[in-house]
Amino acid sequence: MTATETEIPVAIVGVGKIARDQHMPSIERSPTFRLAAVVSRNAHVDGVENFSTVGALLEARPDIPALALCMPPQVRFEAAHAALLAGRHVMLEKPPGATIAEVRALQWLATDKGCTLFASWHSRYAHAVDDARQWLKERAVRHVSIVWKEDVRRWHPGQDWVWQAGGLGVFDPGINALSILTAILPHPVHVTTSELSFPQGRDAPIAARVDFANGRGAVVEAVFDWRQEGPQTWDIDVVTDDGTLKLSDGGARLAIDGAKRHAGDDREYDGLYARFANLIATGTSDVDLSPLVHVADAFMLARRVNVAPFDDDSVSSA
């Protein structure tokens, strides 16, 4: 399918917190997309057609050329595969899948079917990320410190899938930091050591320490933790041969040598949908797996540490 001059009907698959908080408001603001349907077994959205399965949507609504998949990564492949086989364009919420191989299979299928596949990384569209990339482009990076700490009860209330195999645990937010890291550094890095903390009875880590290097003398140290209470911390500090850069608030704020440069509001998903529209219009795809590769490598090299059990007494509203 190709884009037209009119609004593109889009369907959201998986009506949870991220869909309601981010995708739906951005679609409402988008000059290109119009929310035409949703797919969920447990939730409904007023004003649009609701389906219980992707198959039912694809059969009943051939007029919907684009789908945004917001369900957990462990079950996303089947929905994406069916959509692409039906000739629909697909946006994958982060992380794009439970494994690298399955996303690569989807990439091949999208090319074969002439469809757009967009493995989205919303944190790359934070207000100050592109300016940070431009500033670092001509500088030698010496040291990077990532501190990404948040409260899982606040951001994933009652969502058991984050603790299951393939749910990534603390790397669900941590991969946001890695998506920024891979976007702003002038040279790629690779994981050298990893320590993952698993609560008893859980299949995914609640905290992680990961070190990276790039063969050019740069050292990257990352600390991820899902037990943070009070103010949340999403900071990246970069020391170069010509000054120090700090991204804070998940990439919304930028300071150079302590002087504030930029601060903006949270409209990351507006950027995602603008990018998705451009990809559809140009008949191209965007599938950068580098953040997910770092997570996979962290698991491969991990020293496992068992920590106290974690009981989430939150109740999901999704």
Image (cartoon, helix red, strand yellow):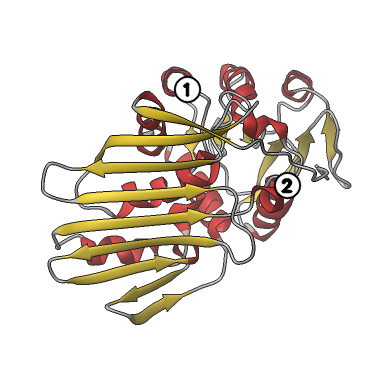
Q: Is residue 284 left or right of residue 75?
A: left
Where residue 17 is drawn, which disc sits there? 2
- Name the residue that disc number 1 marks: 99
Q: Is residue 308 left or right of residue 185?
A: right
Q: Circle 1 sits in a helix, a strand or a loop, which is it?
A: loop
Against 203, residue 13 (above or below) is below
Q: Residue at x 42, y 18 (%)?
A: 101
- The residues tagged by marks 2 and 1 sit, at their Cα atoms, a distance apart of 23 Å
**Residue 284 seen in render:** no
Against 78, residue 190 (above or below) is below
For badge 2, the amino acid type reads: Lys
Q: Residue at x 45, y 41 (%)?
A: 208
Pick the front one: 105 or 100: 100
- Asked if marks 2 and 1 touch (Cβ < 8 Å), the reply is no
Q: Residue at x 57, y 16 (%)?
A: 85
Residue 51, image x and y in percent?
A: 83, 28
Quarter of the rendering containing residue 291: top left
Residue 123, image x and y in percent?
A: 48, 53
